[in-house]
Amino acid sequence: MALIHCPECKREVSTRAVACPACGCPIAEGRDGSAAHAAKPVVDAGLLGKLAAVLGAWVVAPHVERTIGIVAFCLMAAFVGYFLFSGGR
């Protein structure tokens, strides 16, 4: 285990550290001495799969059921809005 200088605060940091313990700056080498791991992507395969499943279910659902769902949602929203803004009279 060797010590290197942090590129940001210039303090000594272990080559096995992922980030500087003093300032949090990422270190060029990871715990095993190899290059640091790439940042985790915001959109990964799991998220894309879930999005595809939801969109697929929406497209495949018959239009009648979809219309009934939209109408039911609008009626519930109107009912809740009426009681919120009318004071529950």
Image: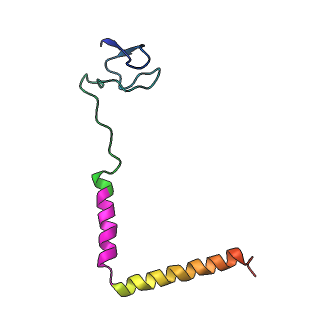
Write down the quadrant of residue 35 in the picture: top left
Residue 52 covered by magenta stretch: yes
Write down the quadrant of residue 83 in the picture: bottom right
Q: Which residues are magenta?
A: 48-62
How was the colour assigned to the protein in this rendering? rainbow
Left or right of residue 68, residue 57 in this image: left
Q: Residue at x 41, y 22 (%)?
A: 20
Q: Where is the N terminus found, in terms of image quarters? A: top left
Residue 81 covered by magenta stretch: no
Q: Position of residue 63 (x, y in %)?
A: 35, 85
Q: Where is the C terminus found, in terms of image quarters? A: bottom right
Depicted 36 relative to depicted 84: above or below: above
Left or right of residue 49, residue 20 in this image: right
Q: Main secondary structure of the magenta part?
A: helix
Q: Position of residue 72 (x, y in %)?
A: 50, 83
Depicted 25 relative to depicted 72: above or below: above
Write down the quadrant of residue 68 in the picture: bottom left
